[in-house]
Amino acid sequence: HPCAGLDWGHFHPLTHGEESCDNFTDLNLSHCFMGTSLYVRLLLYTRSNLDCGRELDHHRLSSQPLFNLSRPTAFVIHGYRPTGAPPIWIDHIVHLLAEQEDMNVIVVDWNKGAANLNYFTAVTYTREAARNLTGFIMTMEEEGAALSSLHLIGVSLGAHLAGFVGANLKGKIGRITGLDPAGPMFTSTTPEERLDPSDAMFVDVLHTDMDSFGLRGAHGHIDFYANGGVDQPGCPKTIFAGKSYFVCDHQRSVFLFLCALNRTCSLTGYPCSSYGDFLDGRCLQCEAFKPASCPVLGYDISRWRETLLRLGQTKVFFSTTASLPYKKLSYRVDMVTWNQYLRWGVVYIRLHSGRHFTEARVDHKLLRLEQYTSTRLLAQFDEDLQHIQKISLRISTGNVIGPRYKIRLLRIRFTPLERPERPLMCRFDIIMDENMEVAFRPLPCNSPH
């Protein structure tokens, strides 16, 4: 990529009262063109200095009174920085992590090393940066920190860097979270050469760009695939959009994780073998996780941890909207159709509440509607409407010339998946024309019909 093509924002140094703060290294394009040699800085943030980083001495931990080794510690590790500008999300993640619990948040600033026009140079520096960070963590352990209380959060190339640290420490680190681990140069490597589940006691991974900058496959105890792990809604589909075409899908992993930390997004992952099976409505149960619910993306994974460690590697899928809070509202829709002639079609469902409505299109593939068929669909809506007064339904068969055939629905049932407290909605015996919308008032499923 041209060096200027991937700028992820700028950062302004802060001063806190009279003290000057240690801020993330801000480099410019000239560093990027000339290349930088590796230098790792560790910036400490705690609840008492959230807006003012303190650089830690790698060897004399006691010299920093704010660094309390009895607290849990999260390390935030960025990836490749082709322009040298600090990541725009650093400040957000520091604040959101400190809200989860009273912890040390250490930003691993390896911008001198990550800021290179040559991506391959940055890749080779990940091993060296990992050795540096491993040494620091060993010093922490010598001074009383428990490795199980450490959580490494790595973005892109930073996810592999975290994996190398974990492997150096024989997998004894508590947790590694990989946010869209980098794909280029890691695609056909062995587990030792990239992030894998043996690198920590628990490894969770989020995929958003597997067909470009992200790594395909499964690399944690649990792998979350947002929108199948490839194209993210709202991201440009053509190169004419400029730099956002390159970074939008890849960077979405960070924004989804920030949103999950903020608790404004409750993004539920459904265990499944593929995104296609998930969209087909084949994976909407979470039997293995009972009595807990399906796994939810975010910081607190304690409810699912034991089950996931027992299951081995688990893939979970979910869909999102294009913007905050990213959450779609999902319904399982069960239909029993009775029609004289075999029809193939896609289904459009609208939920109405007052003057508001939200629509789901189940159009990822054609549905087979025949004489007496039970069909299960996953209908995902962009808005959460609470009191549904009317539902409208259209089955589009693409038949525009011959006679318009009738489709009879003996029963249709809507089950809200992430809102178990809400009632099931049903309707019985609806006769509709193909390609024509039919509207009805939903009834409670236990009502006589």
Image (cartoon, rainbow, N blue to C red):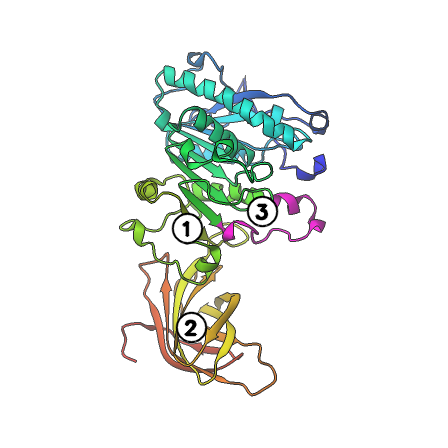
The residue that disc 1 covers is 269
Label located before the other in sequence (3 or 1): 3
The residue that disc 2 covers is 390
Front position among marks 2 and 1: 1
- CA gap between label 3 and label 1 equals 18 Å
The residue that disc 3 covers is 249
The reply to whether the C-beta atoms of the residues labelled 2 and 1 are less than 8 Å apart is no
The spot of residue 14 in percent (x, y) is 57, 25
Label located before the other in sequence (3 or 2): 3
Q: Nearer the viewer, residue 222 or 83?
A: 222
**Residue 262 in view, yes or no:** no
Front position among marks 3 and 2: 3
The spot of residue 86 in percent (x, y) is 60, 31
Which circle marks residue 87 in the picture?
none
Of the residues shown, which amino acid type is indicated by label 2? Lys
Residue at 54 percent of width and 76 percent of height: 397
Q: Residue 115 is drawn in which quadrant?
A: top right
Residue segment shown in magenta: 226-249
Of the residues shown, which amino acid type is indicated by label 3? Asp
**Residue 18 in view, yes or no:** yes
